[in-house]
Image (cartoon, rainbow, N blue to C red):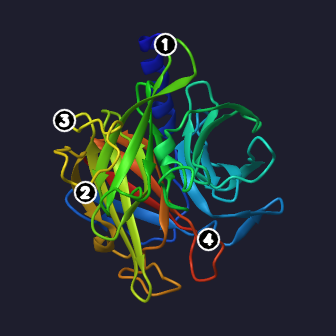
Amino acid sequence: MRRRAVLATAAATLAAATCLTAAGPANAQTGGACSPSVAIERFSDVLDKTTYEGTFVGNFSGLAADRDGTLAAVSDRSVLFSLDGRTLQPRGALPLADENGAALDSEGLVVDRDGTYLVSSETEPSVRRHSRDGRILDRLPVPDALRVAPAGRAPVNGTFEGLTMTRDGRTLVAAMEYALAGDATGTVRFQTWRRTHGGDGFVTAAQYAYRTDPGLGVPEITATPDGRLLVLERGFTAGVGNTVRLYLADPRRGATDVSGIEHLTGQEGVRPVRKTLLADLADCPDLGATAKQPQPNPLLDNIEAMAVTGRSHGRLHVLLASDDNQNAVQTTRFYFLRVRL
């Protein structure tokens, strides 16, 4: 597809998404500021510990605005849900599996320009393209070093958590959650793929270093309309609760391509991706939320999914969702934010 068509498709997708969650359900009181850049409008626990046609609704790890005004939400238990953009109620549940029919640890989600789904799994890790009915259409190449040990140097349960497509439709980006063995602690890699000319295939492209705050990993990334990235950083301390911070990052501003560097120890003269803190979500008003376990703010939970669902008055509408791990002391919660870049 020519660039003009790609941009038109991306713009149409975002325009359709502006209606998403416009009048969604809320447990919340009136929203308020988390920081000068971020405000929370409301939250919703409407899907917590619910089922849809016999399938548990929860374990959300990825969100994306779909072309028809619905929300696509992937769980790490290999289910792709379609959610109503206004009520959040499920409209469909599609099982996902690998080439042998085994369940995936699905973490990241992108709805591509043709409506197919790109889904990352941190089992291998992998990125697969699925049709609208769940069939596997393609599998993207992954650099050997990013594979889970012993095949590569990635830790178990610490690989492709975040997945996003730039708004021009040309570049796919996956974020490792934690550092590779041999890399400095807190230095995670963002892997990119470039779309092949005129097609729907992808080839590996640049890789960037991103440095998290101490003790945190990267559970999600999502592209902004201007080509930058929103990055979630998250950690958990028993007896204290979750730390969740939202950053704005821009790999285009002088970050080094580290795809050819075996070990990132901090001594190579590498320029990591620049980042700017937008908000620590512990600083948001709690809106009357309750937590089932200790939290620095009862609003917080295991936040793991994020999508830009629209924009108005110079601010992005950003939707977050937590992964309750099907755990009685965690909550499936949606957070409706307004973000000024």
Residue 22 at least partly seen: no
Q: Going from the N terminus, do you reach mark 1 or mark 4 first?
A: 1
Q: Going from the N terminus, do you reach mark 2 or mark 3 first?
A: 3
- Tell me the CA gap for discs 1 and 4: 40 Å
Rendered residue at 37%/68% (across/down): 30
Q: Which residue is at the front of the view, 156 or 119?
A: 156
Q: Position of residue 25 (x, y in %)?
A: 56, 61
Q: Going from the N terminus, do you reach mark 4 or mark 3 first?
A: 3
Q: Position of residue 298 (x, y in %)?
A: 42, 80
**SS of the residue at dot 2?**
strand
Q: What residue type is disc 4 on? A: Asn
Q: What residue type is disc 3 on? A: Gly
Q: Which residue is at the front of the view, 211 or 337?
A: 211
- Tell me the CA gap for discs 4 and 3: 38 Å
Q: Going from the N terminus, do you reach mark 4 or mark 2 first?
A: 2
The residue where tag 4 is placed is: 325
Q: Quadrant of residue 150?
A: bottom right
